[in-house]
Amino acid sequence: QVQLVESGGGLVQAGGSLRLSCAASGRTFSSYAMGWFRQAPGKEREFAAAITWSSGFPYYADSVKGRFTISRDNAENMLYLQMNSLKPEDTAIYYCAATMAGSGVALLRRNNYGYWGQGTQVTVSS
């Protein structure tokens, strides 16, 4: 079992920045690839970013590429999402998730993630 707890969400103006954190506990954190997904009101939960467990290679949705940066600290069992140049369309609940999938397109699919946090709200005002 892996327990995930997100923090760092809030209200920010368009163009601003936020840094989300995800604290992991339970089984060996470094064995899991990690992802950030988001869900806006009335929409499906969608992929935002992911990072492999070994090399730390990042993957990004086109909508966040160049603005968001995913990182992890395996020693501290922490996952981060630095979000810059935020837009109103980034408003959503952001979830961190863990998967045993190694790399590639498998990290983009939410059905491949077996562990989820409770989510943190990000609201970007125009």
Image (cartoon, helix red, strand yellow):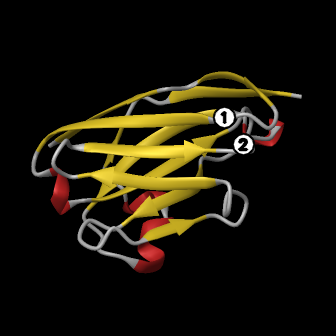
Which image quadrant is residue 4 in?
top left
Question: Quick one: 56 or 46, which is closer to the camera?
Answer: 56
Question: Quick one: 28 or 86, which is closer to the camera?
Answer: 86
Closer to viewer: mark 1 or mark 2:
1
The residue under the point 52% across, 58% down is 49
Residue 18 vs 107, above or below: the answer is above
Question: Quick one: 16 or 96, which is closer to the camera?
Answer: 16
Residue 58: x and y, percent? 46, 68
Q: Secondary structure at mark 2?
A: loop
The residue under the point 23% across, 71% down is 54
Q: Are marks 1 and 2 in contact (CB under 8 Å)?
A: yes
Residue bearing mark 2: 43
For the C terminus, give its image quadrant.
Answer: top right
Residue 31 vs 119, above or below: the answer is below
Q: Residue furthest left?
A: 27
The residue under the point 63% across, 29% down is 122
| Cα separation between marks 1 and 2 | 9 Å
Q: Residue furthest right?
A: 126
Q: Secondary structure at mark 1?
A: strand
Residue bearing mark 1: 92
Residue 118: x and y, percent? 41, 28
Residue 87: x and y, percent? 80, 41
Residue 85: x and y, percent? 74, 44
For the N terminus, give its image quadrant.
Answer: top left
